[in-house]
Amino acid sequence: MCRSTVIAAVICFAGAAGAQVRHWAETPNETIWRTLYTNCDKGYAVDLPAGIVAHASHPPSPNHGFLISASNPGTTAEVTYEDPRVIGVFDEYDAAELGSARAYLDLELKSVPKKNVLQIQNTVFQGLRGVHARYRVNAKETAHLNESLIVFRKDGLVYHLILQTTDNHYAADSALFAQIRSGFRLLTIREGECFNQ
């Protein structure tokens, strides 16, 4: 009797130890992530600071990244690009065959009317060549300050890390954006099916 109890306890413990913690949950409108966002198909993860909630699309929509509300980083309410203060981390394949982070930045800047480019500099981020830009967009109601970090991975993936904020909130939102950037890390892209935590 005692031996079967010990065996059952060992099997239970081994199963619990091997189980992965799921860092996401589905809401009626989106998938929210806490602590860790992973995208094993596109080869990256982002460690999220305590209390920060990342918002992504529902399956079966493609998993291409997330948004965070810079004004209320812990909100579980839906977050969209229409919000004046957001942080985004996105990926895409180089389907347009632009071939460089700078080409993607040029395309981004070309699509933004009424902008004033404040800074563009080449950078290396997580060992990948990229470009970092800061520019102001003069909208009707208010001006937005945008930061865009774009990096190009050799296997044809492009990563975009974006901050959209206002002048009044730039210091605080930029600090949160720096935390998100520092939590970004590359993963090995594996062939076949993978599972996001």
Image (cartoon, rainbow, N blue to C red):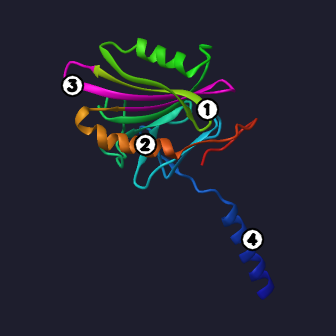
Residue beneath disc 2: 178
Secondary structure beneath dot 2 equals: helix
Q: Of marks 3 and 1, which one's residue comes earlier in the chain?
A: 1
Q: Of marks 4 and 1, which one's residue comes earlier in the chain?
A: 4
Camera sees residue 165: yes
Q: Amino acid at mark 2?
A: Ala
Q: Are marks 3 and 4 in contact (CB under 8 Å)?
A: no
Specify start and end residues of the magenta stretch as a single range.
Answer: 138-163
- Return the residue nearer the eye: 19 or 157: 157
Q: Residue at image x 59%, y 57%?
A: 21
Q: Residues within 10 Å of mark 3 (few under 14, many from 20)?
A: few
Query: Which label belongs to residue 142?
Result: 3
How far apart are the alpha carbons under marks 3 and 4?
60 Å
Secondary structure beneath dot 1 equals: strand
- For residue 11, above or below residue 67: below
Query: Which label belongs to residue 11?
Result: 4
How far apart are the alpha carbons under marks 3 and 1?
34 Å
Left-right relation of 166 to 35: left
Q: Residue at image x 44%, y 34%?
A: 88
Main secondary structure found in the magenta portion: strand
Q: Of marks 3 and 4, which one's residue comes earlier in the chain?
A: 4
Secondary structure beneath dot 3 equals: loop
Q: Amino acid at mark 1?
A: Leu
- Return the residue nearer the eye: 20 or 174: 174
Left-right relation of 129 to 83: right
- Return the residue nearer the eye: 129 or 150: 129
Residue that sits furthest to the bottom in the current view: 2
Residue beneath disc 1: 128
Residue 112 in the image, given as x and y percentages of width and height: 37, 15
Q: Amino acid at mark 4?
A: Ile
Residue 40 in the image, given as x and y percentages of width and height: 64, 40
Q: Amino acid at mark 3?
A: Thr
